[in-house]
Image (cartoon, rainbow, N blue to C red):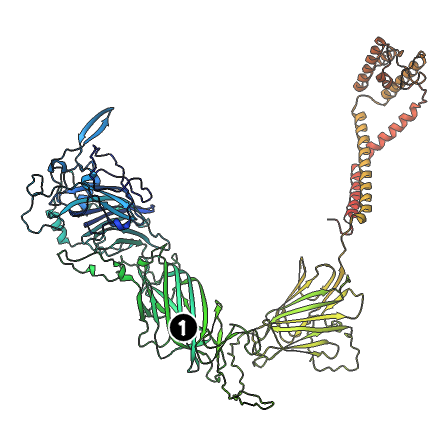
Amino acid sequence: MPATPAPSRHRRDLTAATPTARPSRPQSPTSTTNFTNSTISTAHLHKINIVSRVALDGKAKQGKDGASVKMYFKLSVPYDVAPGATIPLCLEENLKILECQVHPLDHNSAPYSFSGTAYPLLHSAARALALPPRSTTTYHTAYGLSPPQASSRSNGASSSRVSHLAEEKYTGQIVVSSYHICYIVPTIFPPRSENSEDTFVRTKSRRASLGGDKNNMQFMAAISAWVPYATKPPRYPFLLSIPIPRCLHNSAKIRIFPPESTSSSFASLSSDDESLPWDLASDPRVTRPSSRSLHKHDSTNQFADDESSDSEANITAADGIFLRGSFPSTERLRVRWAKPSKTVVFGDVGRRRVGVQTAQGDMTCTVTGRARGGITMDVEYKGVCRDLWFPGVATMLGLDVGLIAQGCDVMWTDKPEWNVSGPVGFDLSAVGPRANGARFDSMDPLSPPSPTHTQFPSSSPSLLRAPLPEGGELSLDASSSSLSADMPSVSSLPSDRTDPSMPLTLYVNMNDLLPPAKNQFDFKISGSIIVAPRVQPNDTFDETTPVVLPRFTVHAADGEKTSITVRNEADALVEVFNLSGDIHRDAQARKTVLQRGAYTRCGQEGGRIALKRVATVSRPLTPGRGALVHNPGPAKSPIYPRPVFEGPRMLSCVTATVTPLLRAGERAPDAYSVRLCFPAPVFDAQSRPLEWVEFGLANPEARMLGANVAVDASHSSEKNEVDLSSHLHVDITSASADNIPVKYEVGGGGGRQWISWIRVHVEGMPGAMIVVDYCVRTEVSNVNTFDVLLPTFGIPVGKMVVDIETQGLRLSMLESNLAYEQVYVAGRRLLHHSLSEFFYPKVSIALHPASPPRTGFQSLPNMLIVLTCVIAMALCFMVMWRLSDTSHGFHNGMLDDAAFAALLDMRLEALRTAEMNAPTNTQQWLDEPSIDTLDTRSWPSSEPTQVLADEPTNDYFYSEHVWHDSEDTIHDDDDDTQPSLSKALSFPSAMHIPFDASRFRAAWANAKHRVETLPWDDVRKVAGRVWDVCLRIYHYPLDPP
């Protein structure tokens, strides 16, 4: 059969094969025919086993995402199968077929003649399946068929030759249908008649080899495929999953690339004396055949002329590792390899621990009663672990799950065992010690560092590993998936184990949890336990003491969420409390009360429960007046665990937030509030549990700034003194511990040192966050300066933080004896560290209302002033620039003062002469000046030009101007018909203007001298001062930036 391209289940362009014979057509042996990818429903597939031998030849190259695998099948098709039927061979899975070929075999399982060089895939299939040497006759010759003519072209000339391969109608073909790799039976079968001359030569043996009898047709099929890796490092090993048909004779030869860092020579997998660079494992296990069978096979096997042996003597270091041998019947062959891991034994079970990325559980606690000083309950945990991973090649791993109950003891009831069950991937459970290092990362090295050899962990037990009988009565149709089906609940506790808090080790088979679709492990754990509060030997037990709800946890999980549900099945009430809070003083600590049969959800945070018995008191028909029913038992105080107190007796941190208070309609505050936050101390000076925490508010007028006020709050030696703090009033608004209102007392300070002394009740709440709010107001009006009353403690304070909120106000003054100060948007922060006993913090502030934003009418005068100043400055600069430019032009020009004066006199003389010689004219045009003021038509054109030309001048500017006047004069003499407005504007007026040249020259010289001697630094200083004034006016009332 010619080579066919890669099939794909997404390309269904051709129809399924039919029993009707198709006409043959000539084909080239090297040409590629269209692949028949049939679309056939699963109901029409013939589920029979036609594969009698399987051989795999794979090669994995470094840097690729998969491996190239060639699969060779020996097919034995019964004659009673319908022509053109589709028979599934194996699952497609993630296989990508590149090329496939089918060739018939004779009755001795020998391939009919074909060219090994033209069809190397068939040549390799005959060798891998250990078939006899090729027959000397072709399939067409054996049955008297006309061989097809294969055409080819060489150098533009076409030629034809005889093809030795049979057509698809005689051999069948390989297709992908319904996610299976299928074989389509040929449409034309060879004849079975014994009298026909084209029939097979029958053997004398009554029983031929498997598939070699007269009732079966034999073929060999070769498939070249690409198999991508199912998993890759770093969290997983390299994993190849190759789907294959079920068969009794299976062999594999897979070559694996060597690691980059390894330079030693490699050998075959059968060599146990050398340390291999990879940890290599396969499922099922591939075993190397004995040397005796190899020698026997080599002595009897014969090769054709174009064949050669693939002896292992040619293996070099660059060839890598060979996985070579036989394996039992299976639906897929899995090959794993990874870098060698260190030998570490976890617990008693000796299994490596699997990693879990996320774990989610649902815990149900059913309360059943009371026993042995605790609460009996049936617990059931349903856990789901996702993204299980392990970087090595081991497949049978352990998963540790433990039961925790904070501050409580867990004991067994009459049934000391856990019932554990799970779906596919769960084998059994056992109790083992807590795994050390159960949570690890694939990149972290395991210790101790010791080398290990290639490991082959065994898979689940299978009868196919045992020797099979020679007869064909054994059925292989049953799938091995039934071996890993859901298992019933098993007991997990050995007889010598009595502690239910010890972790369980669940056995996980990674072969059943391949990512990404099936990488989820579900399991369920149930049992009966007793949860009792953990008390000291000298403590008395109280039935009302709550116990913490237990929960299961997956130790190796990177992230875990557990939801807890409480159900009441006892003849009593179950009180459910939150995990934190005093159940006797805080009404919010109790969540709910459960009657029999009720339940509630506690969420992920968990909770506490207490069992409360219901008192059965007979009620009279006519109760007496005032009759009350009391609990006969005495009330007992709860037992609190005594924490270990090893640190110094002090407050770690005290935070005070000061907020000024403004009344409605007022712009300045007359009071302020203070919020104190500090943790409650544990013990007093005598190491007894602390009942009250006390602090005082010192008088700011005591003049003991920053000193230690060593005085008792309840006694004062000063008598008949005026109270300087009578104008201050302190009101305590609230006191709480962990958001729970607590009792507090306020007393007079006495004397002049203290304004008030405050006590807060903190018994039974060690370490709780105490919050005290108080307000300070004064009777003095119109006071903007305040002395902030801050607490003074009788024990040292590690750090004091004072936050002053000044939003909407302006802080004009701040005085304090605290060491550090920080400025932020909302106000100021003061810090002080290591406060001694009775340290008096002093803080004085002055607050003023913030200036309201100016409107447009209020800022208009300021804007006018600024605009006027800017215009004045601009005019000054323009005048100075003009004077400087004029001085520069006369100074750099070629005309000196004497020449300029002479030129000016000549110009004036020319103007007077023109005025005296001007004739009168009675004609006047519309809007033209009178003759008394201007007459330009009879203006002599030669005199001004002659006067200016007689005097030599060195100023090119005035020379050009004089030449321009001459041109205008000449032009006026030629045109006397109408007046010209340009002429009137080009010459001075005819009026007599007295002019004193000496005064002009003196003024000019004075101005020139002033400009030349004016220092530029003074001008710049004056301009800078003016600019500063303008900035202050513009940014008022704020300072300029």
- In x, y percent, where is residue 995? 93, 23
Quadrant in which residue 867 is drawn: top right
- Is 574 in front, or is 686? 574
Which residue is outermost to the left?
204
Q: Is residue 827 above or below residue 417?
A: above
Which residue is outermost to the front?
621
- In x, y percent, where is residue 688? 56, 81
Left or right: 1002 as drawn, with respect to 653: right
Left or right: 631 as drawn, with respect to 960: left
Which residue is outermost to the top?
974
Disc 1, SS? strand
- Is 646 in front, or is 506? 506
Query: Badge 1: few (under 14), some or many (20 or more) residues near its Cα, within 10 Å?
Result: many
Quadrant in which residue 469 is drawn: bottom left
Amino acid marked by disc 1: Val
Left or right: 651 as drawn, with respect to 337: right
Question: Is residue 310 at least partly visible in the picture?
Answer: no
Q: Is residue 720 above or below residue 675?
A: below
**Where's the N terminus, which quadrant?**
top left
Q: Which residue bears the numbered disc 1?
A: 379
- Is 781 in front, or is 623? 623
- In x, y percent, where is residue 391? 35, 57
